[in-house]
Amino acid sequence: MPDGHNCIEHLTVINDVEYTLQSRTIELDNGERHQEYRVLLNGNEIKSWTRGDILPYFNVNRG
């Protein structure tokens, strides 16, 4: 369910609830890059894009 940005999606289950984690790399006009993530539940955003890389916490490697 990407929102037009290149992102990686990973499904994870926490306390018997399935969440979708999305992670993306943002490149700024000055050439800097950083990671962002957000969390979806049933296709609805429950945590908006936030700076950071959450995937390593779930043992997910970038593809």
Image (tube, rainbow, N blue to C red):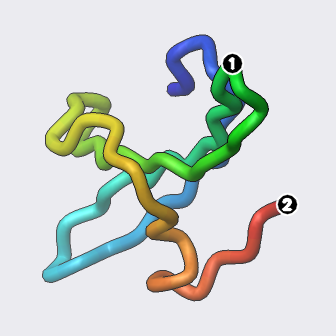
Q: Which mark is residue 15?
A: none
Q: Position of residue 37 (x, y in %)?
A: 43, 49
Secondary structure at numbered mark 1: loop
Residue 2, x across and y down, in percent: 55, 25
Query: In the picture shown, does residue 44 fall above or below 4?
Result: below
Looking at the rendering, which quadrant does residue 42 occupy?
top left
Label 2: element kind? loop
Query: What number is the disc on residue 29?
Result: 1
Mark nearer the N terminus (2 vs 1):
1
Front-most of residues 23 and 13: 23
Q: CA distance from mark 2 to mark 1?
A: 24 Å
Q: Mark 1 belongs to which amino acid?
A: Asp
| Residue for point 30% across, 48% down | 39
Q: Which residue is mark 2?
A: 63
Q: Residue at x 32, y 74 (%)?
A: 13
- Looking at the image, how many numbered discs can be counted on the residues? 2
Q: Is 45 placed left or right of 9 in the picture?
A: left
Task: Place residue 30 in its image quadrant.
Answer: top right
Amino acid type at circle 2 is Gly
Q: What residue is shown at x 48% (from left), y 82% (from top)?
A: 58
Mark 2 vs mark 1: in front: 1
Q: Is residue 7 above or below residue 63?
A: above
| Residue 43, position as x, y percentages in the image | 30, 31
The residue depicted at 55 percent of the width and 58 percent of the height is: 10
